Amino acid sequence: MTEADKQAMLKVIGVESADELFADIPESIRLTRPLNLPKGMAEAEVRRHVGALAAKNADVTQYACFLGAGAYDHLIPAAVPQLVSRSEFYTSYTPYQPEITQGVLQATYEYQTLIAQLTGMDMANASIYDGATALAEAALVACNQTRREKVLIPQTVHPEYRQVVHTYLRHQNLEVVEVPYKDGATDMETLAEMVDDTVAAVVVQQPNFFGVLEDTRGFGRLAEKHGALLIAAIADPLTLGVLEAPGAYGAHLAVGEGQPLGNPLSFGGPYLGFFAARDELVRRIPGRIVGATVDKDGNTGYVLTLQTREQHIRRERATSNICTNQGLNALTAAVYLTLLGKQGVKDVAYQSLQKAHYAQRAITALPGFSAAWERPFFHEFVVRTSADPEELVQRLLDYQIIGGLPLGRFYPELSDAILFCVTEARTKEEIDRLVAALEGLT
């Protein structure tokens, strides 16, 4: 702004100087010195400066990533960001006049259909904030449906998912009881003792937080025996390309994190939670559902079929205060799944499985490393090490490797253990480089 511009603006509003604009503010609390900010930069200088700051981050375009634990580095076809970045999709996140925005509704309808097919469930909603809130909302659905006040959640469920469930339920006078694990999987004998006719829901994560495969059908039998709902939590839905779908092993609700479906890691977000259920729970679920219909001329049209949130119905009848869906992220998931198709999803899951097992065999063959337990696992696995896990992971960064997750942060009894993840994005050369680096550092 030039001085002439400034004077012209002051003249229009009828004051002599900028100081007059602040006449009502006591001088004792006014700032009388220049702001402590660096000197302004030209556009080219700003680009260089921001680029230098970004270069300090260890991102997956430059580093080989072996960190999972709820956020996964999968390959994303170039067509996905190209399609979802079209201007037509940068619309209002909530269609307040939904029937006018047929394109948004159709895209959401396709997303719901794909999630229902992937999970083997009857229906899915338009998405929710993330995997953790999806699980917490599922627990509330179970309590409302059964009129019971206790939820059993294994310690093998993602620790942060468990924290969110505790936060949601404690303020509604609902009880969350954690089930211990044994050798990397839920202790089924203890679970059988804990399930009774007061339990609203039993949660199972498949694969669990350690990457181990749980006895999902055993969970289903215990829940059914006592009239409880079975909630399946899935941190990486691409594993369903190989693993049995929740609907097949008796889950009433299937929820989880949709980030692996074409969404980049993005330093932690935004992500999306997917939420699928059996038909009998449709009026209990949070968020909204898009449905297909026909207009008076017989043409296919899309509508918001169900909106059980407090902004649309009486608060006391609302199922949740969730009042949005992750529209662009859900669209990304739909485009990604459509591009891959059934066989593509199977290929991603199979490659992740095979590469993880190759990495686990190579790492546990090194001196000072061993498998934490002998259990079937998918694309994440836990190893114990004689080295300090935190220091080891930090030193791997010098080799441009993002190592696994030191588990002592969440499980004190596993302070000598690291959770590694391998997806289809990792090459044999990168896995071998990780193994060589671990050998050299220990």
Image: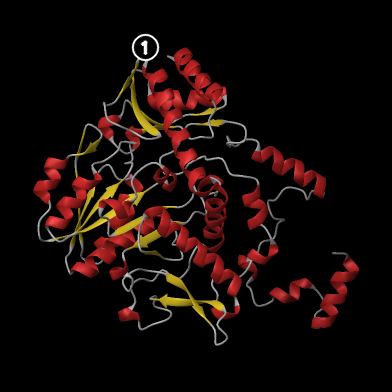
Give the percent coordinates (x, y) of residue 396.
50, 24
Question: Which class describes the residues within 10 Å of circle 1: few (<14), some (14-19), or many (20+)?
Answer: few
Residue 96 seen from this side: no
Q: Depth check: 39 or 160 in front?
A: 160
Q: Which residue is disc 1 drawn over?
A: 367
Q: Depth check: 32 or 302 in front?
A: 302
Choose top left, top right, bottom left or bottom right for residue 93: bottom right
Give the percent coordinates (x, y) of residue 413.
25, 31
Q: Is residue 150 above or below residue 291?
A: above
Give the percent coordinates (x, y) of residue 344.
52, 43
- State the count of labels: 1
Residue drawn at point x = 57 percent, y = 60 percent:
328
Give the percent coordinates (x, y) of residue 156.
27, 42
Q: Residue furthest front?
A: 298
Residue drawn at point x = 41 percent, y = 76 percent:
306
Q: Is residue 231 left or right of residue 307?
A: left
